[in-house]
Amino acid sequence: MGIVDWTNAVMGYAEYDAAYCYLDVCLSRGARVAKAFLQRYRDASGVAVEPLWFWSLVVAKRAAPDPATWLPPYRELGRMDLTSRVMRRRFHAFVREALCEAAG
């Protein structure tokens, strides 16, 4: 089981792909939906995505410094409910959670 990103298809770590999708769902749908995705991914694939804080911080750099740059593709899909403010708030919460987990 894996996640396929045909735009940038390469062989890599399943943990990275799952964490990247986790970030994307967190930004687009919120933390609750993202956590549900991650649990289902773990259940279906057997990939633990551990330590999650590490993989979360690795993928967070893709949306830094401004996750609002991810808005145009969402707008093309009709997601007018997403705003720069929502994306930034969700991103900061995502990074904060990863840093708190890392600190133990």
Image: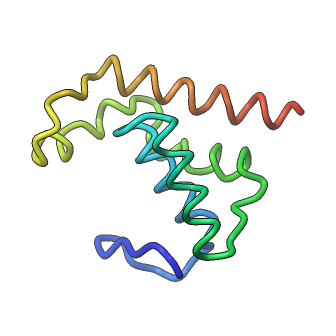
* Residue sitting nearer the eye, 65 or 48: 48
Residue at (29% x, 40% y) in the render? 70
Marker count (numbered): 0
**Residue 35 figure quarter:** top right
Residue at (25% x, 23% y) in the render? 83
Q: Residue 58, relative to residue 69: is it above or below?
A: below
Farthest residue, direction top: 85
Q: Is residue 44 left or right of residue 75?
A: right
Counting from the top left corner in percent of width and height, residue 43 is at 63, 68
Counting from the top left corner in percent of width and height, residue 25 is at 42, 46
Q: Is residue 68 left or right of residue 59?
A: left
Q: Is residue 55 left or right of residue 65?
A: right
Q: In what quadrant of the picture does the C terminus appear?
A: top right
**Residue 50 figure quarter:** bottom right
Q: Residue 38, relative to residue 88: is it above or below?
A: below
Farthest residue, direction right: 104
Residue at (62% x, 73% y) in the render? 13
